[in-house]
Amino acid sequence: MSNPSDSTAGVRRISSGGAYEDVIGYSRAVALPNGLVLVSGCTAADAGGPYDQTVAAFDVAFKALAQAGLGPEDVVRTRMYLTHARDVEEVGRAHKELFDAVRPAATMLIVSGFVDPSMVVEVEVEAFKAVAE
C-alpha cells in the first residue's frame, strides 16, 4: 500500500502496514522517479536464529520491492547489521543463497543492539530498475 501524502512529485512511499511505521514516522520503502527503490531496515525477531531471521528479513524487503514492481534480481546494494560476530557465517550463508546470482554491493556490520533484544539481524536493500522513457 502506498502513502498518499507524498511531498515530492514522483516519489512513491510504500507501507507494509507495520505498527512502527506510524509510531516512528517512516515508510517501508521509497520509490524514486529515476527507478531507485530504498527499503528501510527489515527485521524478523520471531523467525528463529540468525540464518532464519536473515531470510525472513529479506523476504520483508522483497515484498516491499514487489509493491514497487521490482524483485530480488533488481537489488544493487544490501546492508546487514548483526549484534554478534559469531553470526557472520549464518547471515552470510543466507545472503549468498538469496543473492549469489545477483551479486549486489554488500556491507555487513556488527552493532551493539536493536530495539528488540530478540533481533540478531537487520537488513536494508536498495534496488534499481531503469524507468522506460
Image (cartoon, rainbow, N blue to C red):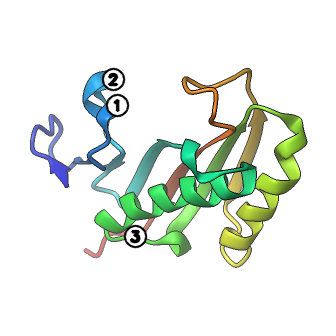
Would you call the spot at circle 3 few (<14 residues within 10 Å), some (14-19), or many (20 or more)?
A: some
Label 1, label 3: how many angstroms apart (C-alpha)?
A: 24 Å
Q: Please give the label number shown on residue 70.
A: 3
- Are the residues tagged 1 and 2 within 8 Å (C-beta)? yes
74 or 33, nearer to the observer: 74
Tell me the SS state at disc 3.
loop
Q: Considering the image in quadrants, where does the C terminus appear?
A: bottom left
Mark 1 or mark 3, which has the lower sequence index?
1
Label 1, label 2: how many angstroms apart (C-alpha)?
A: 6 Å
Would you call the spot at circle 1 few (<14 residues within 10 Å), some (14-19), or many (20 or more)?
A: few
Q: Label 1 belongs to which residue?
A: 20
Q: On the image, which quarter does residue 55 sit in? A: bottom right
Residue 117, given in percent of the width and then of the height, sits at 63, 26
Amino acid type, label 1: Tyr
Is 49 positioned to the left or the right of 66 in the image? right
Q: Considering the image in quadrants, where does the N terminus appear?
A: bottom left
Mark 3 or mark 2, which has the lower sequence index?
2
4 or 91, nearer to the observer: 91
Would you call the spot at circle 2 few (<14 residues within 10 Å), some (14-19), or many (20 or more)?
A: few
Between circles 1 and 3, the one closer to the viewer is: 1
Q: Please give the label number shown on residue 24.
A: 2
Between circles 3 and 2, the one closer to the viewer is: 2
Measured along the vertical axis of the image, is residue 17 above or below residue 20?
Answer: below
Tell me the SS state at disc 2.
helix
Residue 36, given in percent of the width and then of the height, sits at 41, 56
Tell me the SS state at disc 1.
helix
- Outermost residue toward the bottom? 101
Residue at screen point 72% across, 50% down? 49
Amino acid type, label 3: Leu
Amino acid type, label 2: Ile
Residue 53, given in percent of the width and then of the height, sits at 64, 51
